[in-house]
């Protein structure tokens, strides 16, 4: 059986800079004449003291769910590593890989309990390696956008026969906004670190910069850049004996990728 004793915790902090407006859909709780057709997801309650004492992140502030980043990275990696091709059978087509053996399943998790039940004990993937936390506006962006946290973009759908325009009002977070996020990666005995971390998490971030986050990407929404990355490595003795953590800072994903030797 594989060794699943925890060896190290790796924390990746980063800032997401929006190059174009971002739209991650939320729910519309009220219906108004002339209202927004597609609102963005927002906090349903205030996060008190988020930026420090008496500096709150207020209700109705837009944010990026950790699940949105995780799902997008997983999808891009499955295409890049050939896992979509492997899932072409009729009952699996279009679904996330659930083989339980590939790097994507090991890092992001295997949703199928049947897969786990059918794997030999020495091939079990163990716990998901990565945790993706919700991603909130930086304090600077929050203060800059406080009065108008989102923008309304009016788009038209043109009837091909009558040429009649059908306008719709889409809400999005404006370009230039910045969010701060964190991914926590757990390293167990026999894990191939840093190779797997580089080939999944970091490669996924790099792929995403040339793709899009959220919806309406084909219309130019959701172009982002990761910046101000901080890689924090904490050996298990950091928690057991107070050992020092190792901190490295990088300007962008490319610099971090170049620094990791595998």
Image: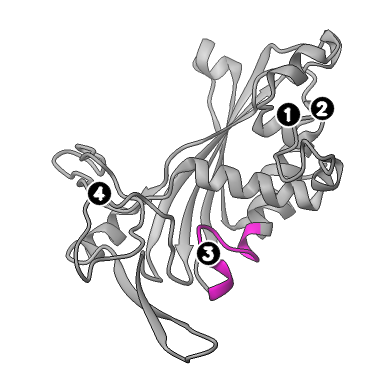
For disc 2, the marked residue is 101
| Element under disc 3 | strand
CA separation in Å, label 4 and label 1: 37 Å
- Which image quadrant for residue 150? bottom left
Task: Tell me if residue 55 comes above or below residue 154 in the rendering.
Answer: above
Comparing 140 with 206, the one in front is 206
For disc 3, the marked residue is 224
| Element under disc 1 | helix
At 63% from the left and 58% from the top, the residue drawn is: 208
How does the figure colour the protein chain or chains? one colour
CA separation in Å, label 4 and label 2: 41 Å
For the residues bearing labels 1 and 2, Cβ distance under 8 angstroms: yes
For the residues bearing labels 4 and 1, Cβ distance under 8 angstroms: no
Residue 32, how many percent across, how many down?
A: 19, 62
Q: Is residue 228 left or right of residue 82?
A: left
At 13% from the left and 41% from the top, the residue drawn is: 54
Residue 194 visible: no
Q: Which residues are magenta?
A: 208-219
- Dot 1 crowding, Cα within 10 Å, few <14, some 14–19, many 20+: many
For disc 1, the marked residue is 106
| Element under disc 4 | loop
Residue 12, how many percent across, how many down?
A: 55, 41
- Which image quadrant for residue 92? top right
In primary-sequence order, the first of circles 4 and 2 is 4
CA separation in Å, label 2 and label 3: 31 Å
| Element under disc 2 | loop
In primary-sequence order, the first of circles 2 and 3 is 2
């Amino acid at each position: 059986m594989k060794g699943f004793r925890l060896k190290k915790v790796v924390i990746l902090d980063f800032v997401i800079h929006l190059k174009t407006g971002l739209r991650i859909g939320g729910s519309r709780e009220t219906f108004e004449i002339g209202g927004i057709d597609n609102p963005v997801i927002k906090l349903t309650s205030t996060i008190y003291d988020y930026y420090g004492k008496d500096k709150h992140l207020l209700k109705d502030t837009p944010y990026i769910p950790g699940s949105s980043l995780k799902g997008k990275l997983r999808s891009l990696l499955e295409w890049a590593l050939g896992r979509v091709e492997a899932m072409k059978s009729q009952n699996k087509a279009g679904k996330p890989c659930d083989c339980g053996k590939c790097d994507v399943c090991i890092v992001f998790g295997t949703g199928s309990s049947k897969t786990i039940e059918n794997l030999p004990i020495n091939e079990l993937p163990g716990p998901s390696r990565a945790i993706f936390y919700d991603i909130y506006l930086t304090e600077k962006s929050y203060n800059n956008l406080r009065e108008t946290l989102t923008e309304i973009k009016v788009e038209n759908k043109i009837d091909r026969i009558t040429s009649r325009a059908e306008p719709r009002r889409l809400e999005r977070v404006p370009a230039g906004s910045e969010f701060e996020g964190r991914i926590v990666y757990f390293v167990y005995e026999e894990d191939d670190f840093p190779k797997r971390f580089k080939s999944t998490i970091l490669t996924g971030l790099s792929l995403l910069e040339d793709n899009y986050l959220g919806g309406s990407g084909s219309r130019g929404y959701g172009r982002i850049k990761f910046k101000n990355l901080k890689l924090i490595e904490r050996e298990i003795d950091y928690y057991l004996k107070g050992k020092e953590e190792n901190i490295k800072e990088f300007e962008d994903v490319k610099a971090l990728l170049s620094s990791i030797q595998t």
